[in-house]
Image (spheres, grey):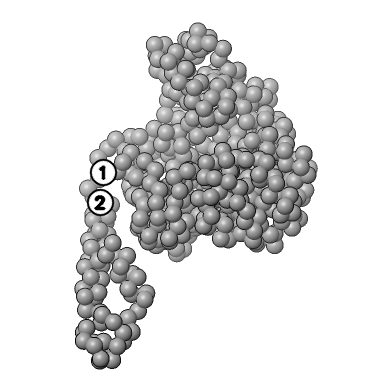
Amino acid sequence: MFKKILIANRGEIAVRIIRACREMGIATVVVYSDVDRAALHVRKSDEAYPIGPAPAAESYLRMDKILDVAKRSGAEAIHPGYGFLSENAKFAQACADAGVKFIGPSPHSMNLMGSKTSARREMEKAGVPFVPGTSRGLASAEEGEQVAERIGYPVMLKAAAGGGGKGMRLVHTRQELRSALESAQSEAQRSFGDSEVYIEKAIVNPRHIEMQVLADEHGNTVWLGERECSIQRRHQKVLEEAPSPIVDPDMRRRMGEVAVRVAQAASYTNAGTIEFLVDEQKNFYFLEMNTRLQVEHPVTELTTGLDLVHLQLRIAAGEKLPFAQSDVQIRGHAIECRIYAEDPDNNYFPSPGKITVLLQPAGPGIRRDSGMYEGWNVPMDYDPLLAKLIGYGTDRQQAIMRLDRALYEYFVAGIKTNISLFRRILRDDDFRAGKLDTGYLDRLLAKAAPAGASAARDSQSTKLERIAAIASGMFAVLEPSAPGSKNGSAGEAGPVPSNWKQKGRAEALR
């Protein structure tokens, strides 16, 4: 096993990996940009090294600087987390050339699955079902129009090298296609340095369901159950759960077998995720493979009892998977909310700034993966993900109720967050009934906020906060003004004021 690894990331995922390493007796090295000098991952690691200014292109995306830190610190391996360089085959190859183990798949597998068009061609050979469309980038708008006429509108344009909704356009008519293609190609070039865009049939209101796979370096591959990821905004996942409300044991087995076939066709090793679109008839189609650990991995960990980061490290160290497919059991239900620094009242615009008060939930069935703390300045230079709140229960109803309770315990002051959005989702009738698809959140946000129990509860919370502020103000007035005084008169002995009380009251009166 490795003695020391470098974590080429930041935020909550870096903290998550640090904790796994500490449990396994592995020393950790992290890197940080100028604005992350006081970040939580820097505080929790064994060693930390600066790598440049705030822009990711000058720090977290600088392969040379990260590999230099690995060499100077004596790190034997690099865990990329997700985002940044996690799916960059050139970085994986650079690690290999430098004699540092990349904790992830091989550069070959990453190249193959990193391009959606090459992945589609490979899956076509393997007989994997995928959405009708092209397996190569469009050469012209005319070609796109011909393909769209053949497969039928609406169609989706997608960046071959993309993800996160970048370089993606939904096209309903022939008249829209030319300008949409130009726009998608331009955004793909800016985001990924590759303007290749392909076309596929748009499945109306599909579910987005993904399957977690693990593969060791000895030819063993297993699937670990599915995750429902249909609640999205601008093609970006917001809330995920495991298992999916619509997947029965037979469908789970069939999806898992296809996912294993995909991974084996790519000679894949380590942790990966196969994403599917599922139509109203429960037919599923291969969408893409994410060649890294996913943001939503905790829901799989809770429902399988497996630690995916531990397993990633063991696989990278050359160990065999310690279990077979028949040993994998799905138990209970887990739901994850991605807590972002964004303003729900301003079209979810990013909300950087200082966290002045932080009250975090706990209790039965609640897990928090967080990268924030009270007093920390949230930078505006990176993805606004602050933390993940996960609720687990013996069934979906219990998971919902536990998570709903926890969200009302969560309080972040100084910045805006999307916590109120999750309160609304969890109390929505369609969500509770499992009636989900990728258009669900847009429909929910188009409706007026309910004036029922949830709104009343929010109103009650506001009232309590006001009462607390008024009470704090009264206590502040009545508090002895200085040590050794009573009711403000000098010379009479009195109790020394509590710094804890003064700090709390000052924050409540802000």
Give the residue number, with chain letter if any, for mark 2.
455
> Helix, strand, or loop for circle 2?
helix
Q: Which residue was labeled with disc 1?
A: 449
User: x%, y% of residue 279?
Assistant: 47, 28
Q: Hey, what amino acid is under mark 2? A: Ala
> Is 424 left, or right, of 32 in this rendering?
left
Residue 215 occupies quadrant: top right
Identify which residue, 335 or 494, lies in the foreground: 494
Return the disc, 1 or 2, that comes first in the chain's sequence.
Answer: 1
Q: Position of residue 72 (x, y in %)?
A: 72, 52
Report the amino acid beneath label 1.
Ala
Do residues under tags 1 and 2 come within 8 Å of each other at their CB atoms?
A: yes
Q: Is residue 113 above or below residue 494?
A: above
Residue at left 25%, top 91%?
491
Q: Which quadrant of the view contains residue 111?
A: top right
Q: Residue at x 47, y 17 (%)?
A: 182
Can you see residue 245? Answer: no
